[in-house]
Amino acid sequence: MFNEWIFPDNWQVLVITLCTVLHQRSAWRLAVIIAGIIFAKGRRTITSWFRAAGISRRYKAFYYFIGSIGSRTETIAAALLEYMMHLIYKGKDKVLMGIDDTPTRRYGPYFAIEQNFHDLKETEGAGQQQVRNFWANIGVFHLNMWVHTMVELWAWNKSARAICDRSGSPWDAISRRPSHADRCAGLRREVIAQTFFAGSGQRRKTQKIVRQLYKLIKLAA
Protein backbone atom coordinates (compact mmCIF):
# COMPACT_ATOMS: atom_id res chain seq x y z
CA MET A 1 0.00 0.00 0.00
CA PHE A 2 1.00 3.64 -0.34
CA ASN A 3 2.15 3.87 3.28
CA GLU A 4 5.47 2.58 1.88
CA TRP A 5 5.85 5.71 -0.27
CA ILE A 6 7.84 8.69 0.99
CA PHE A 7 5.78 11.87 1.23
CA PRO A 8 7.26 15.30 2.06
CA ASP A 9 7.76 16.01 5.76
CA ASN A 10 5.32 18.93 5.79
CA TRP A 11 2.68 16.69 4.19
CA GLN A 12 3.23 14.07 6.89
CA VAL A 13 2.65 16.74 9.54
CA LEU A 14 -0.69 17.60 7.95
CA VAL A 15 -1.78 13.95 7.92
CA ILE A 16 -0.67 13.44 11.54
CA THR A 17 -2.64 16.55 12.51
CA LEU A 18 -5.82 15.01 11.09
CA CYS A 19 -5.07 11.61 12.65
CA THR A 20 -4.68 12.98 16.17
CA VAL A 21 -8.44 13.45 16.55
CA LEU A 22 -9.29 9.93 15.33
CA HIS A 23 -9.33 6.62 17.17
CA GLN A 24 -5.68 5.58 17.25
CA ARG A 25 -6.33 1.95 16.35
CA SER A 26 -7.71 2.95 12.95
CA ALA A 27 -6.24 6.43 12.35
CA TRP A 28 -3.40 4.99 10.20
CA ARG A 29 -5.97 4.22 7.49
CA LEU A 30 -6.43 7.94 6.80
CA ALA A 31 -2.88 8.33 5.42
CA VAL A 32 -3.42 5.37 3.08
CA ILE A 33 -6.75 6.73 1.78
CA ILE A 34 -5.35 10.24 1.24
CA ALA A 35 -2.41 8.80 -0.73
CA GLY A 36 -4.93 6.90 -2.85
CA ILE A 37 -6.82 10.12 -3.54
CA ILE A 38 -3.62 11.83 -4.67
CA PHE A 39 -2.64 9.03 -7.06
CA ALA A 40 -6.10 7.96 -8.30
CA LYS A 41 -6.62 8.07 -12.06
CA GLY A 42 -9.70 8.37 -14.24
CA ARG A 43 -13.11 8.73 -12.65
CA ARG A 44 -12.57 9.41 -8.94
CA THR A 45 -14.81 6.74 -7.47
CA ILE A 46 -14.01 5.35 -4.04
CA THR A 47 -12.82 2.15 -5.73
CA SER A 48 -10.28 4.17 -7.74
CA TRP A 49 -8.99 5.59 -4.43
CA PHE A 50 -8.65 2.09 -2.99
CA ARG A 51 -7.06 0.70 -6.14
CA ALA A 52 -4.47 3.48 -6.25
CA ALA A 53 -3.64 2.88 -2.57
CA GLY A 54 -3.30 -0.88 -3.04
CA ILE A 55 -6.30 -1.64 -0.82
CA SER A 56 -7.87 -4.94 -1.80
CA ARG A 57 -8.58 -7.62 0.80
CA ARG A 58 -9.50 -5.27 3.66
CA TYR A 59 -11.47 -2.76 1.61
CA LYS A 60 -14.59 -3.09 3.79
CA ALA A 61 -12.69 -1.87 6.85
CA PHE A 62 -11.54 1.18 4.90
CA TYR A 63 -15.07 1.79 3.61
CA TYR A 64 -16.50 1.77 7.13
CA PHE A 65 -13.62 3.96 8.29
CA ILE A 66 -14.69 6.63 5.79
CA GLY A 67 -18.16 6.50 7.33
CA SER A 68 -16.64 7.13 10.76
CA ILE A 69 -14.80 10.13 9.30
CA GLY A 70 -18.14 11.47 8.09
CA SER A 71 -19.49 11.48 11.64
CA ARG A 72 -16.50 13.51 12.91
CA THR A 73 -15.95 16.03 10.13
CA GLU A 74 -16.29 19.11 12.33
CA THR A 75 -13.60 17.94 14.74
CA ILE A 76 -11.20 16.89 11.98
CA ALA A 77 -11.77 20.06 9.95
CA ALA A 78 -11.15 22.19 13.06
CA ALA A 79 -7.76 20.51 13.53
CA LEU A 80 -6.83 21.18 9.90
CA LEU A 81 -7.96 24.80 10.13
CA GLU A 82 -5.96 25.36 13.30
CA TYR A 83 -2.79 24.00 11.69
CA MET A 84 -3.45 25.97 8.49
CA MET A 85 -3.76 29.22 10.45
CA HIS A 86 -0.56 28.42 12.34
CA LEU A 87 1.31 27.71 9.12
CA ILE A 88 0.12 30.72 7.14
CA TYR A 89 0.00 33.36 9.86
CA LYS A 90 2.99 32.24 11.94
CA GLY A 91 4.40 35.37 13.54
CA LYS A 92 1.73 37.58 11.97
CA ASP A 93 -1.58 39.07 13.03
CA LYS A 94 -4.35 36.57 12.32
CA VAL A 95 -6.90 38.07 9.94
CA LEU A 96 -9.12 35.51 8.26
CA MET A 97 -10.42 37.67 5.43
CA GLY A 98 -10.76 41.29 4.49
CA ILE A 99 -12.98 42.33 1.58
CA ASP A 100 -12.24 45.47 -0.42
CA ASP A 101 -15.73 46.64 -1.39
CA THR A 102 -14.62 49.03 -4.12
CA PRO A 103 -16.20 48.40 -7.54
CA THR A 104 -12.97 46.95 -8.98
CA ARG A 105 -12.48 44.49 -6.11
CA ARG A 106 -16.03 43.64 -5.09
CA TYR A 107 -16.27 40.38 -7.02
CA GLY A 108 -12.80 39.02 -6.20
CA PRO A 109 -13.91 36.70 -3.36
CA TYR A 110 -16.70 35.28 -5.53
CA PHE A 111 -14.22 34.44 -8.28
CA ALA A 112 -12.04 32.60 -5.75
CA ILE A 113 -15.04 30.57 -4.56
CA GLU A 114 -15.95 29.68 -8.14
CA GLN A 115 -12.36 28.63 -8.92
CA ASN A 116 -12.17 26.41 -5.83
CA PHE A 117 -15.52 24.84 -6.70
CA HIS A 118 -14.20 24.10 -10.20
CA ASP A 119 -11.03 22.53 -8.80
CA LEU A 120 -12.98 20.37 -6.38
CA LYS A 121 -15.26 19.08 -9.13
CA GLU A 122 -12.82 18.75 -12.02
CA THR A 123 -9.47 18.00 -10.35
CA GLU A 124 -10.43 16.33 -7.07
CA GLY A 125 -13.52 14.68 -8.55
CA ALA A 126 -15.85 15.64 -5.71
CA GLY A 127 -19.23 13.94 -6.12
CA GLN A 128 -17.94 10.98 -8.17
CA GLN A 129 -17.22 8.59 -5.29
CA GLN A 130 -20.39 6.42 -5.47
CA VAL A 131 -20.94 5.52 -1.82
CA ARG A 132 -24.20 4.20 -0.42
CA ASN A 133 -24.81 5.59 3.05
CA PHE A 134 -25.25 9.01 4.63
CA TRP A 135 -22.05 9.23 6.70
CA ALA A 136 -19.85 7.84 3.94
CA ASN A 137 -21.20 10.51 1.56
CA ILE A 138 -20.30 13.21 4.06
CA GLY A 139 -16.90 11.60 4.66
CA VAL A 140 -15.83 11.39 1.01
CA PHE A 141 -16.90 14.95 0.22
CA HIS A 142 -14.96 16.31 3.17
CA LEU A 143 -11.93 14.21 2.22
CA ASN A 144 -12.01 15.90 -1.20
CA MET A 145 -12.04 19.33 0.44
CA TRP A 146 -9.31 18.46 2.94
CA VAL A 147 -6.99 17.05 0.27
CA HIS A 148 -7.59 20.17 -1.84
CA THR A 149 -6.56 22.31 1.14
CA MET A 150 -3.56 20.10 1.95
CA VAL A 151 -2.22 20.33 -1.61
CA GLU A 152 -2.54 24.11 -1.54
CA LEU A 153 -0.75 24.28 1.82
CA TRP A 154 2.04 22.03 0.54
CA ALA A 155 2.59 24.40 -2.39
CA TRP A 156 2.07 27.59 -0.37
CA ASN A 157 5.69 28.83 -0.29
CA LYS A 158 6.94 27.10 -3.42
CA SER A 159 7.84 28.94 -6.61
CA ALA A 160 6.00 28.23 -9.86
CA ARG A 161 9.18 26.71 -11.31
CA ALA A 162 9.43 24.29 -8.37
CA ILE A 163 5.79 23.17 -8.73
CA CYS A 164 5.39 22.97 -12.50
CA ASP A 165 7.30 20.76 -14.89
CA ARG A 166 6.58 22.30 -18.29
CA SER A 167 9.42 20.49 -20.07
CA GLY A 168 6.89 18.34 -21.89
CA SER A 169 4.95 21.38 -23.16
CA PRO A 170 7.46 24.01 -24.36
CA TRP A 171 4.65 26.05 -25.90
CA ASP A 172 3.31 26.78 -22.42
CA ALA A 173 4.47 29.92 -20.61
CA ILE A 174 6.91 29.03 -17.81
CA SER A 175 5.75 32.05 -15.80
CA ARG A 176 2.06 31.05 -15.88
CA ARG A 177 0.55 30.75 -12.41
CA PRO A 178 0.28 27.07 -11.44
CA SER A 179 -3.23 25.68 -11.33
CA HIS A 180 -4.46 23.30 -8.64
CA ALA A 181 -3.94 20.45 -11.12
CA ASP A 182 -0.31 21.60 -11.52
CA ARG A 183 0.13 21.53 -7.74
CA CYS A 184 -1.30 18.00 -7.52
CA ALA A 185 1.06 16.85 -10.29
CA GLY A 186 3.99 18.54 -8.55
CA LEU A 187 3.24 16.70 -5.31
CA ARG A 188 3.05 13.37 -7.14
CA ARG A 189 6.41 14.02 -8.82
CA GLU A 190 8.04 14.88 -5.50
CA VAL A 191 6.72 11.70 -3.87
CA ILE A 192 7.95 9.59 -6.81
CA ALA A 193 11.36 11.26 -6.74
CA GLN A 194 11.81 10.78 -2.99
CA THR A 195 10.58 7.19 -3.08
CA PHE A 196 12.53 5.88 -6.06
CA PHE A 197 15.46 8.22 -6.63
CA ALA A 198 16.59 9.73 -3.31
CA GLY A 199 19.14 6.97 -2.66
CA SER A 200 20.00 6.11 -6.25
CA GLY A 201 23.63 7.21 -5.99
CA GLN A 202 25.83 9.39 -8.20
CA ARG A 203 27.34 6.88 -10.61
CA ARG A 204 26.93 7.93 -14.25
CA LYS A 205 25.33 4.64 -15.31
CA THR A 206 22.93 4.72 -12.36
CA GLN A 207 21.88 8.29 -13.12
CA LYS A 208 21.15 7.35 -16.74
CA ILE A 209 18.90 4.51 -15.60
CA VAL A 210 17.18 6.83 -13.13
CA ARG A 211 16.46 9.43 -15.83
CA GLN A 212 14.88 6.82 -18.09
CA LEU A 213 12.84 5.34 -15.24
CA TYR A 214 11.64 8.82 -14.26
CA LYS A 215 10.39 9.41 -17.82
CA LEU A 216 8.36 6.20 -17.64
CA ILE A 217 6.93 7.02 -14.22
CA LYS A 218 5.90 10.51 -15.40
CA LEU A 219 3.68 8.85 -17.98
CA ALA A 220 1.91 6.93 -15.21
CA ALA A 221 1.80 9.73 -12.64
Image: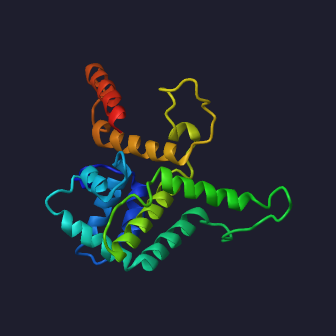
Is 27 left, or right, of 71 in this rendering?
left
- Residue with the most extreme right position: 103
* Residue beneath the point at 32% across and 34% down: 217
Above or below for 186 versus 166: below
Is 146 left, or right, of 197 in this rendering?
right
Could one spot residue 154 in this view of the protein? no
- Residue with the most extreme left position: 57
Could one spot residue 143 in this view of the protein? yes
In the rendered picture of this protein, how many numbered marks are placed on residues?
Answer: 0
In the rendered image, which quarter is residue 69 located in? Answer: bottom left
Q: Quadrant of the C terminus?
A: top left
* Residue beneath the point at 33% across and 41% down: 192
Is 119 left, or right, of 68 in this rendering?
right
Asked whether 93 or 110 is in front, the reply is 110
Above or below for 170 versus 45: above
Q: Where residue 99 appears, x then y in whole percent?
A: 76, 66
In the rendered image, which quarter is residue 86 located in? Answer: bottom right
Q: Where residue 72 appears, x then y in whole percent?
A: 39, 79
* Residue beneath the point at 34% across and 71% down: 136
Q: Where residue 54 appears, x then y in whole percent?
A: 22, 52
Q: Where residue 165 appears, x then y in whole percent?
A: 49, 33
